[in-house]
Image: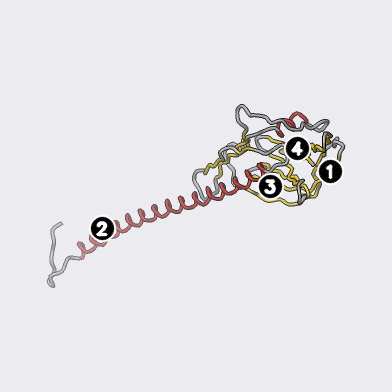
Amino acid sequence: MSRHWDADGGYTLVEMLVTIIMLTLITGSITAVVITSLKHQNSLQVRGSVLASVRSSLEDIDRDIRSANPLCYATGTEITMLESKETSPVQTPVIVDYKVQGTKLVYTQYNVVSTVVPPATAPANYTCSVAKTTGTLTSTTYYTELTPIRSQRTVISNLTGSTSTIFALPGAPTFNTCPAPVNVPNALTQAAAMAIQELTVSVSVQPSTLSSPVSASDCGTYLRNYAVATS
């Protein structure tokens, strides 16, 4: 378009309109790029925050598992353990359970009742047995969860993908020499779970603010999962 000057030496109205339209298009393109960049940056920040939160939760789970006394039950979706300290100062035992419930990993803590007689009807995952040796005599104490529960909280939310292998055992686990429960429900499962030396926790999380999931895993927790207390 050729330039035309009016009587006062200025551009014509048409040229001014073309200039304004071009500036508007350029400004709009720049704005779109800036908005896209900010969205990407915000997504990265959210992913970093979610990953840090999940890793912190896995560290808490690992600490609980390592202190199991003993580890009583283990599947891909649930871990149950007795937490007790029989050396001074003696602490009141509790049963701790991590279980996948829908899209959440839930922590539950139970008060317990102890007996020297194996409970006949208690579910295996809520029954823990500990062998205690005094001199040359070994006896077993059985701990069973009591209701109502002591406390409960969600450890990790927004689980996605396969939730059937949150807790994974190595392909060829190494077993310790540990007291095997006798005459308790699901005794074989309990005996094997109590002897596990290594366990890995892996999760995939996708809150609504993310378009793709965030995955995290520990490197394999080595367990102190067989307690033979002596006195």
Q: Earlier in the sequence, mark 3 or mark 2?
A: 2
Give the label, 1 or 2, closer to the camera: 1
Amino acid tagged 4? Val
Give the label, 4 or 1, closer to the camera: 4
Check contact, mark 4 vs mark 1: CB within 8 A.
Answer: no
Amino acid tagged 2? Met
Check contact, mark 1 vs mark 2: CB within 8 A.
Answer: no
Residue that carries the numbered disc 4 in the rendered image: 228
Residue that carries the numbered disc 3 in the rendered image: 107
Is residue 191 something one can see in this rendering?
Answer: yes
Distance CA(mark 3)–CA(mark 2): 60 Å
Q: Is residue 37 left or right of residue 68?
A: left
Distance CA(mark 4)–CA(mark 1): 16 Å
Please provide percent x and percent y for residue 80: 71, 40
Q: Is residue 48 left or right of residue 14?
A: right
Residue that carries the numbered disc 1 in the rendered image: 114
Callout 1 secondary element: strand
Disc 1: CA contacts within 10 A as few (<14), some (14-19) or many (>=20): some
Distance CA(mark 4)–CA(mark 2): 81 Å
Res 74 quadrant in image: top right
